[in-house]
Image (cartoon, rainbow, N blue to C red):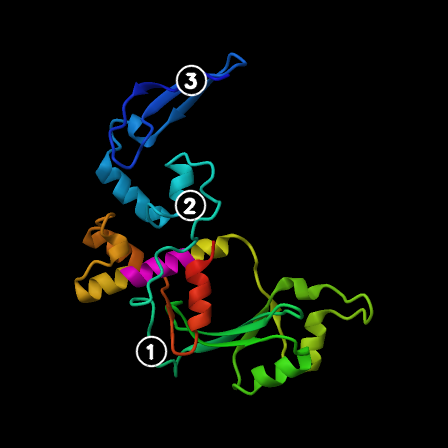
Amino acid sequence: MATEWKQIIPSRSQYDKWGLRERRLSTGFYHVRVGFSADPLKDDAWARREALKYGGFDTHQWMREQGIDYKAMGGQRIWPMLSEKIHNAQIDIKNWTLFRVIDQGIRHPTVCMWVAINAKGDRHFYREYYATDRSIAMNCRSILSYGKVSGTYIDPSTQRRGAETLKTTMQVYEENGIYCTPADNSFVGYDSVRNAALSTLARYALRTGELPYYFEELKPNQDQLLSLAEKPALTFDLRFTSRCFEECVNLR
């Protein structure tokens, strides 16, 4: 059995529950936990500045890397900073570039999202389509009825060939008038969404002088807000994308 934790250096920050602790394992090895405040230069102010880089104290990245929480990835909301009040916008996208993103399903829903992107890289989701138990041809007719876009991205799994037809799902989409590019499914996409959501919060704070609830504990200064606001932002038109937004808010 391992011994009880022994406190070597007490925590110097309310955001660090560890300080420096150690215990001895039954194998004779020592298990040491080094919280960030074991460094005398890292206090509450440092924690608030650093937490901004992770997206806040509630994100699994902060909880895992600075909170030493080995279970932080389990059940935590991926984007806890999303706000129905702040990320909801009605935007004139006349001069924006339009794209579609498709997640193909047969037994589960087929989903298509429309996103507009401006010259700064801001993303605005303005339409969604959900359908179940419909063929690709039927879905394509519905999706095409909403007009032209500059490009369509699709789940890369659609490049696999079917056992019977030996065609890829992407080929079937092409036969029905929608030419697709495989999307990038790497985990870096989660961080991109997080940074864009934080940019929207920062722009709101700079525009209104009101600090969003999510930033209250972090207390960012003007320079930090400007740095966050420089990144591409993320918004939703909740009149037409409410289901997408709800799924993003609850994604774990």
Callout 3 crowding tier (Cα within 10 Å): few <14, some 14–19, many ≥20: some
Q: What number of labels is visible?
A: 3
**Kind of residue at disc 2:** His
Q: Is residue 151 left or right of residue 211?
A: right
> What is the x, y in percent for residue 152?
57, 74
Q: Which residue matches tag 2? A: 60
> What is the x, y in percent for residue 208?
18, 66
**Kind of residue at disc 3:** Arg
Callout 1 crowding tier (Cα within 10 Å): few <14, some 14–19, many ≥20: few
Tell me the number on the disc at residue 241. none
Residue lying furthest top in this view?
28
Q: Nearer the viewer, residue 183 or 43?
A: 43
Q: Estimate the spatial distance between the alpha carbons at disc 3 and disc 1, rounded to whole Å.
A: 56 Å
> What is the x, y in percent for residue 182?
61, 65
Q: Which residue matches tag 1? A: 90
The residue drawn where x is 57% and y is 60% is: 184
Magenta stretch holds residue 200: yes
Q: Which residue matches tag 3? A: 23
- Could one spot residue 131 in this view of the protein? yes
The magenta region covers: 193-201
Report the mark closest to the observer, 2 or 1.
Answer: 2
> What is the x, y in percent for residue 58?
35, 47
Residue lying furthest right in this view?
164
Of the two numbered discs 3 and 1 on the same chain, state the one appearing first in sequence. Answer: 3
Image height check: is 150 above or below 71?
below
The residue drawn where x is 25% and y is 38% is: 46
